[in-house]
Image: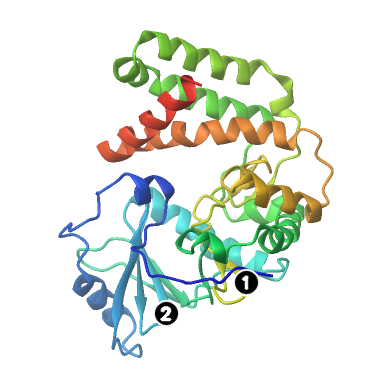
């Protein structure tokens, strides 16, 4: 018997770090729905914007909902605009291979004076982000068995599809070296903020990762690379998975990354239907969970977001003190 599910309407954000720690977008003048309304109306005169609501802002994009049915994503940086082009190329090629709905970019607008990038629109997929729903609405025995076949299909898709679309492609060696390089680049910041003892522990941890051959024991696959409760849509009434969104980090890499952003009980249920032989997947997953705050600190330092840096350092400190 399922417990009763009451859905509230919390504020939206598209990453756990922003949702828990960052006030970056709260009351910020740049988040002006009139600006995005004008961009949409200029690009698509046939779209009559009766209602426009702000859905959220993650590390990369601003997202708005038009008339309750069209989602528009607006890149906020050059590098994000380039990854959007990868999505535009790759998602139509993946859609027919996947057992769950993903966005289909029906509308492409821009650039315009004052906004130098393309932006996209698509018909909103049904459901709500899992992160927005109370625990009573999220059933691991329902979510996991749906996500397992989805990831199997994604990871079985020909990597040439991603290569042709310009997605980043990692070998096992370059995947491990990528994470080692990130750790080296933020080491001075970790030392300044958390002290020499924690910095040494941090470096030891990632040196051990680099030396351990088990972290290279995978066959590269197309990965979502940001599969977390913000990007899994559920029907609040039934708990069924209704779609997967936000492929902005899609690449060819370690399949374990697609298990790192989800809770253990859901991952356990996913593996029962995933069906791919991968003996070291859970071992690699643990390292990639540890890498989440590493990525946050590196991103925040690169783009000058002190809130994300602070959130990432707090999580790193907790990890290093365990």
Q: Is residue 160 visible to the viewer in this orientation of the structure? A: yes
* Residue 209 falls in image quadrant: top right
* Badge 1: residue crowd in 10 Å (few <14, some 14–19, many ≥20): some
Q: Which residue is mark 2?
A: 70
Q: Is residue 175 visible to the viewer in this orientation of the structure? A: no
What residue sits 45% from the left and 34% below the top? 293
Residue 62 horizontal side relative to residue 169, left or right: left
Q: Secondary structure at mark 2?
A: strand
Residue 78 horizontal side relative to residue 144, left or right: left
* Residue 277, x across and y down, in percent: 84, 43
What residue sits 36% from the left and 75% below the top? 65
Q: Nearer the viewer, residue 227 or 179?
A: 227
* Residue 169, x across and y down, in percent: 61, 42
* Residue 318 falls in image quadrant: top left
What residue sits 52% from the left and 62% below the top? 130
* Residue 184 falls in image quadrant: top left
Q: Which residue is mark 1?
A: 101
Which numbered circle lies on residue 300? none
Q: N-terminal of the two: label 2 or label 1?
A: 2
* Residue 148, x across and y down, in percent: 73, 56
Q: Quadrant of the N terminus?
A: bottom right
Q: Secondary structure at mark 1?
A: loop
User: Which coloring applies here?
Assistant: rainbow
Q: Is residue 60 above or below residue 50?
A: above
Residue 50 horizontal side relative to residue 313, left or right: left
Q: Is residue 19 above or below residue 208?
A: below
Q: Nearer the viewer, residue 314 or 3?
A: 3
What residue sits 22% from the left and 56% below the top? 26
* Residue 24, x across and y down, in percent: 25, 49
């Amino acid at each position: 018997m399922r417990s009763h599910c009451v859905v509230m309407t919390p504020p939206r954000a598209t990453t756990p770090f922003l949702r828990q720690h960052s006030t970056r977008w709260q009351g910020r003048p740049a988040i002006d729905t009139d600006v995005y309304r004008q961009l949409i109306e200029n690009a698509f005169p046939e779209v009559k914007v009766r209602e426009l609501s702000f859905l959220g802002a993650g590390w990369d994009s601003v997202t708005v909902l038009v008339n309750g049915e069209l989602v528009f994503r607006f890149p906020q940086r050059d590098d994000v605009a380039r990854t959007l082009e990868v999505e535009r190329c790759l998602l139509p090629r993946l859609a027919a291979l996947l057992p769950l709905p993903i966005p289909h970019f029906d509308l492409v607008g821009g650039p315009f004076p004052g906004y130098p990038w393309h932006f996209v629109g698509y018909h909103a997929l049904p459901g709500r982000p899992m992160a927005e729903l109370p625990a009573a609405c999220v059933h691991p025995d329902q979510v996991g068995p749906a996500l397992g076949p989805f990831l199997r299909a994604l990871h079985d898709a020909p990597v040439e599809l991603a290569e042709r679309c310009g997605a980043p492609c990692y070998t096992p060696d370059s995947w491990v070296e990528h994470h080692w390089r990130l750790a080296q680049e933020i080491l001075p910041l970790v030392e300044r903020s958390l002290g020499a003892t924690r910095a040494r522990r941090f470096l030891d941890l990632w040196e051990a990762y680099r030396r351990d051959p088990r972290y290279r024991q995978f066959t590269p696959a197309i990965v979502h690379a940001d599969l977390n409760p913000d990007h899994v849509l559920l029907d609040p009434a039934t708990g069924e998975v209704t779609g997967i969104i936000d492929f902005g980090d899609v690449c060819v890499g370690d399949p374990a990354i697609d298990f790192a952003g989800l809770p253990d009980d859901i991952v356990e249920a996913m593996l029962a239907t995933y069906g791919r032989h991968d003996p070291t997947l859970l071992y690699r997953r643990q390292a990639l969970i540890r890498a989440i705050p590493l990525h946050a600190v590196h991103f925040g330092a690169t783009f000058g977001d002190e809130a994300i840096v602070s959130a990432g350092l707090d999580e790193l400190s907790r990890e290093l003190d365990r």
